[in-house]
Amino acid sequence: MTYRCENSFEGVLTAVFEAFRLHEDPEILVRGGMQQLSLEVGERVILTDAGKAERVYRAIEQKISPDALQQMYAAWLGEASDVPGLILHAVRSGLRDGPRVMEQLQDPALFRLNDRYRRVMKEVHFFLGALRFVRTKSGLYHAGYEPDGNITGLVAPHFAERLSDQPFLIHDLKRNLCGVYDGNEVILAETPPGLEKGAVDAEEDFERLWQRYFKAIAIESRINPKLQRGFLPKRYWRHLPEMQGRP
């Protein structure tokens, strides 16, 4: 049996609820994915139900652990196609074995889920240090990036604490998603059509500032582009002002 659900965490939790309710062990796929279904395999379309998703959410939080819930959610943000099925397996195991289920790495499925979680958190940690903001003409701080995972919701709260009195916008260019902070709260929203980054001259001034800073702390005789690319893959350079113009 195959379940096809909405591409959201609530959609996946609804599918988990239905798997328990119907006593089935399905493969869970999100609608819009690239997976091809065999005509010989049954398919069930699962419509997202906020009440059902909430019941699974609370069951994980209360009967397994809040940490397990956070790890499942973070793993989901990595957008790997196998994560919905791994979450179902983890919920079944957790309800049986308790709060330490996510530590049972001898279980291949739980090992893979833990790996997906760690990959996401590694990228989050990377961008907490690599994300660069420039100030627009209106005073808004803007940062554009293209993360592998859908991590803006994990990244933005960190900067809300650091830039507590400064409005900012973190723009996931890959997904057209924004994390907006108005000085009080972080809001995630789709990027509105025609969004402009702000005054070009102001952004260029901040880019030059970053470039001067980078040059000032660098020791010319010890610059090692190959090693630098190891710590900071070149695919991220396009959004780092201090790297513009570098080979």
Image: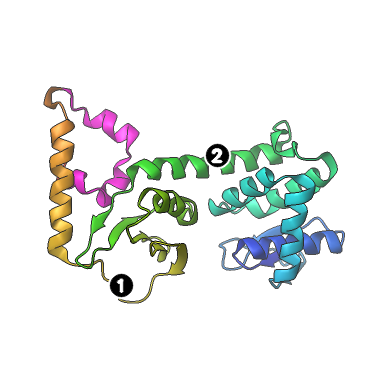
Which residue lies under the disc numbered 2? 118
Tell me the kind of residue under disc 2.
Answer: Arg
**Which residue occupies the extreme bottom position in the image?**
193
Mark 2, secondary structure of its residue: helix
> Residue at point 42% right, 50% down?
161
Which residue lies under the disc numbered 1? 195
* Location of residue 119 in the rendering, given as x and y in whole percent from the top left corner: 52, 41
Q: Is residue 144 visible?
A: yes
> Residue at point 56% right, 62% down?
34
Asked if 11 appears above or below 76 in the picture, the reply is below
Tell me the kind of residue under disc 1.
Answer: Leu
Q: Residues within 10 Å of mark 1 (few under 14, many from 20)?
A: few
Asked if 119 appears above or below 172 in the picture, the reply is above
Mark found first going from the N terminus, 2 or 1? 2
Q: Dividing the picture into quarters, in which one does residue 20 lie?
A: bottom right
Front in this rendered view, residue 67 or 29: 67
Front in this rendered view, residue 111 or 57: 57
Quarter of the figure with the N terminus: bottom right
Specify whether residue 225 is painted magenta: yes
* Location of residue 114 in the rendering, given as x and y in whole percent from the top left corner: 62, 39
On the picture, is 222 further left or further right than 43? left
**Residue range highlighted in magenta:** 222-244
Q: Magenta span: helix, strand or loop, mainly? A: helix
**Which residue occupies the extreme top position in the image?**
221
* Location of residue 71 in the rendering, given as x and y in whole percent from the top left corner: 62, 45
Asked if 1 appears above or below 112 in the picture, the reply is below
Specify whether residue 228 is painted magenta: yes
Front in this rendered view, residue 29 or 173: 173
On the picture, is 184 further left or further right than 35? left
Q: How is the image coloured?
A: rainbow
Quarter of the figure with the C terminus: top left
The answer for how far apart the CA atoms under marks 2 and 1 are is 33 Å
